[in-house]
Image: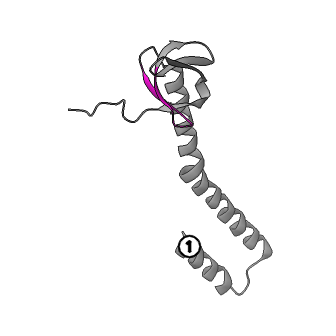
Amino acid sequence: MTSFAFILLQTQSGRAGATQGGNMTMSFIMLLAVFVVFYFFFIRPQMKKQKELTNYRNSLKKGDKVVTNGGIYGRILEVKDNHVMMDVGGDVKLKVDKNALIKDPTAEEPAK
């Protein structure tokens, strides 16, 4: 990207009769190119990840292994609209908000 910008800047400075309108157009094109790069490398992947997490939280069911944002591992006992009841071992049960749950990487079995 920087070499492309360097070439464009050299062609602009090489022109003897370059007008101010040409510089404005080139600046606008470069600004647009930067926005497109940011969208495809930062914004779009983050939106995709957030959508996957929302779908995961909506598909939770009894018996699923989960981890909270705080690092507590457990198994789901009951699912409600905004929260779940989680068994974390022994006689300990926690009521946890769905937004505090992430996927347990140890819960997935490797594909054969």
Using the image as rendered, state which of residue 110 and residue 46 is in the foreground. Answer: 110
Q: Where is residue 35 shown, x and y percent of the image?
A: 65, 56
Q: Quadrant of residue 8?
A: bottom right
Left or right relative to 10: residue 110: left
Q: Is residue 72 magenta?
A: yes
Residue assigned mark 1: 2
Left or right relative to 26: residue 38: left
Q: Quadrant of residue 31?
A: bottom right
Using the image as rendered, state which of residue 112 and residue 17 is in the foreground. Answer: 112
Q: Quadrant of residue 25?
A: bottom right
- The residue at the far front in this view is 90
Q: Where is residue 14 shown, x and y percent of the image?
A: 64, 86
Identify residue type, mark 1: Thr
Q: Residues within 10 Å of mark 1 (few under 14, many from 20)?
A: few
Q: Where is residue 96 shown, x and y percent of the image?
A: 59, 23
Q: Is residue 27 magenta?
A: no
Q: Is residue 7 above or below residue 24?
A: below
| Coloring scheme used | one colour
Q: Where is the N terminus found, in terms of image quarters?
A: bottom right
Q: Is residue 25 above or below residue 45?
A: below
- The residue at the far right in this view is 20
Left or right relative to 53: residue 31: right
Looking at the rendered structure, the secondary structure element under dot 1 is: helix
Q: Magenta residues? A: 64-75
Q: Where is the C terminus found, in terms of image quarters?
A: top left
Q: Kindly identify the residue that appears in the image at 63 percent across and 18 percent down.
A: 82
Q: Kindly identify the residue that appears in the image at 60 percent across and 55 percent down.
A: 38
Q: Kindly identify the residue that appears in the image at 46 percent across and 25 percent down.
A: 74
Using the image as rendered, state which of residue 65 and residue 56 is in the foreground. Answer: 65
Q: Where is residue 56 shown, x and y percent of the image?
A: 49, 26
